[in-house]
Image: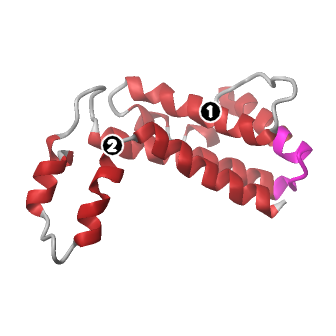
């Protein structure tokens, strides 16, 4: 999560979503940006503040420290993992990998044997922003229900 200020009245759910959205956009401008960034939240001293604020938000909302840490790590890991996968399809900003071309993919798939995999192609290789936010809200909704 990449916000280092705590906007007044910003509920933890919107703070978490907004932070993850910001974090997801940051590495997209760089080739393998998410791979370079991954893992740093545990080892880089400069990231402690980035961890302190969302953990405080979650604890103040009623989560135990354990659940706050697990929720924070789930959101962070989802975000970085999603961007790594997105960058696998678009290794350079704005340049899709030819293997993700839907028509070429459809030619390689046996439509009778892999009907669902074929149908999932458009959802897998388009609409990254909408898909990212939808998945993120599924995580946050699950966290909310666990309170």
Are circles 1 and 2 on residues that touch, CB within 8 Å?
no
User: Dot 1 corresponds to which residue?
Assistant: 44
For the point 70% across and 55% down, the residue is 141
Counting the numbered discs, the total is: 2
Q: Secondary structure at mark 1?
A: loop
| Residue at point 75%, 51% (across, down) | 69
Determine which of the numbered discs, if any, sits on residue 107 in the image: none
Mark 1 / mark 2, whichever is N-terminal: 1
The answer to whether residue 43 is visible is: no
Q: Which residue is mark 2?
A: 126
Q: Quarter of the image containing the N terminus?
A: top right
Residue in the image at 21% along x and 47% along y:
100
Is 61 magenta? The answer is: yes
Q: Quadrant of residue 106?
A: bottom left
The magenta segment is: 57-66
Q: CA distance from mark 1 to mark 2?
A: 33 Å
> Toward the viewer: 143 or 37?
143
On the question of residue 120 being in view, the answer is yes
Image position of 145 with respect to 80: above or below: below
User: Mark 2 falls on what kind of element?
Assistant: loop
**Residue 21 locus on image (x, y percent):** 57, 33
Residue depicted at 50% across the width and 26% down the height: 26
In the rendered view, does 29 fall on the left or right side of 8? Answer: left
Circle 1 packing at 10 Å, graded few (<14), some (14-19), many (20+), is few
Percent position of residue 9, x then y: 87, 28
* Residue 60 location (% of width, % of height): 91, 43
Tell me if mark 2 has few (under 14), some (14-19) or many (20+) residues whose alpha carbon lies within 10 angstroms of its own. some
- Residue in the foreground of this view, choosing between 113 and 97: 113
């Amino acid at each position: 999560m990449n916000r280092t200020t705590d906007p007044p009245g910003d509920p933890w759910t919107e703070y978490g979503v907004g932070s993850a959205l910001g974090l997801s956009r940051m590495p997209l401008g760089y080739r393998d940006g998410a791979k370079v960034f991954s893992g740093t939240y545990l080892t880089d001293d400069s990231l402690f503040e980035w961890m302190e604020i969302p953990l405080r938000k979650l604890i103040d909302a009623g989560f135990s420290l354990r659940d706050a840490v697990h929720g924070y790590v789930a959101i962070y890991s989802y975000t970085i993992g999603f961007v790594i996968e997105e960058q696998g399809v678009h290794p350079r900003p704005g340049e899709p990998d030819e293997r993700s071309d839907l028509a070429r993919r459809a030619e390689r798939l046996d439509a009778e044997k892999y009907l669902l995999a074929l149908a999932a192609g458009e959802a897998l290789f388009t609409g990254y922003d909408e898909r990212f936010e939808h998945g993120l809200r599924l995580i946050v909704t699950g966290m909310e229900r666990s309170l």
